[in-house]
Amino acid sequence: MRIPLSRIAHARSGDKGDTANIGVIAYQQAHYPVLVREVTSERVKVHFGHLVKGKVERFELPNLGALNFLLYEALGGGGTLSLRIDSQGKTFSTALLRMEIEIEENELAGTA
């Protein structure tokens, strides 16, 4: 089945210059393997489309049940240079949580 990422995870985002940073954290440790499988650098890049001009890099944090993403060239130059409304990337986490992922019913229930 397809569900929004927000069903199994929460997220926070921010910036460092022109790079947006998004941390995605599973609500339950049992959902971490689903994050690893479904929330890839490639899918995140496609999800944000033209907003991210550079590469997307992913870091896995299994002990935290989390993934961290760096989205390069995503903020129109960064805080003081950008003409974007969200020049510091604060809404990127909410936007990522809207991404749909594939999950089996038993994985959703945490019984996989």
Image: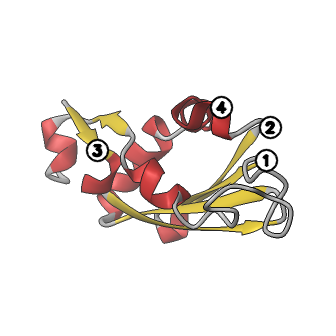
> Residue tagged by mark 1?
72
Which residue in the structure is indicated by mark 3?
4
Closer to us: 66 or 91: 91
The x, y position of residue 34, in whole percent, is: 38, 44
Of badges 3 and 4, nearer the viewer stands 4
Tell me where residue 25 appears, x and y as whole percent: 44, 64
- Number of other residues with Cα within 10 Å of mark 1, as a class: few under 14, some 14 to 19, many 20 or more: many
Task: Work out how far the residue at label 1 is from the one at label 4, CA to CA, in angstroms.
Answer: 12 Å
Question: Distance from label 1 to label 3 (Cα)?
Answer: 24 Å
Q: Give the residue displayed 29% in from the left and 44% down from the top.
A: 4
Asked whether the beta carbons under mark 1 and mark 2 sit within 8 Å of each other, the answer is: yes
Q: Pick the residue in front: 45 or 80.
A: 80
Residues at circles 3 and 4 in contact by the CB criterion of under 8 Å: no
Measuring from the top left, give residue 85's x and y in whole percent: 62, 60
Seen in the picture, residue 66 relative to 97 is either above or below; the reply is: below
Q: Residues within 10 Å of mark 2 (few under 14, many from 20)?
A: some
Asked which secondary structure carries label 3, the reply is: strand
